[in-house]
Image: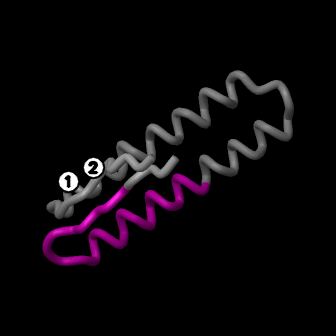
């Protein structure tokens, strides 16, 4: 099964907004799991994942700012 989440060409501002919101959802998910976790190992793994997502978002913003014109985004989930 495949679900197409995003497919299209976006103005840079809109592309950053869409990607920021998607990454923030993933960060919130990890934060919620940290609040439920009892094991230090799980907490450390999720904190590392959050830091990676934050870095990815920084890199995405930097990349989009360096581009001119529309930004093409394609994102799907395959189950």
Label 2 sits on residue: 17
Under circle 1, the secondary element is helix
**Mark-to-mark CA distance, 1 and 2:** 5 Å
Residue 7 location, quadrant? bottom left
| Cβ atoms at labels 1 and 2 below 8 Å apart | yes
Expressed as whole percent of the image width and height from the top left, the position of residue 50 reads 60, 47
Label 1 sits on residue: 14
Q: Which residues are magenta?
A: 52-75
Q: Nearer the viewer, residue 64 or 2?
A: 2
Number of marks in picture: 2
Expressed as whole percent of the image width and height from the top left, the position of residue 33 reads 66, 29
Expressed as whole percent of the image width and height from the top left, the position of residue 59 reads 44, 67
Label 2 neighbourhood size at 10 Å, few (<14), some (14-19), many (20+)?
few
**Is 18 situated above or below 29?**
below
Expressed as whole percent of the image width and height from the top left, the position of residue 25 reads 45, 37
Residue at (54%, 53%) from the top-left corner?
53
The secondary structure that dominates the magenta segment is helix
Residue at (17%, 60%) from the top-left corner?
10
Q: Nearer the viewer, residue 16 or 74?
A: 74
């Amino acid at each position: 099964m495949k679900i197409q989440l995003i497919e299209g060409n976006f103005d840079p501002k809109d592309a950053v907004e869409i990607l920021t919101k998607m990454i923030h959802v993933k960060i919130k998910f990890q934060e919620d799991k940290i609040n439920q976790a009892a094991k230090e190992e799980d907490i450390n793994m999720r904190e590392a994942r959050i830091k990676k997502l934050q870095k990815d978002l920084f890199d995405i913003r930097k990349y989009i700012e360096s581009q001119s014109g529309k930004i093409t985004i394609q994102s799907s989930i395959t189950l």
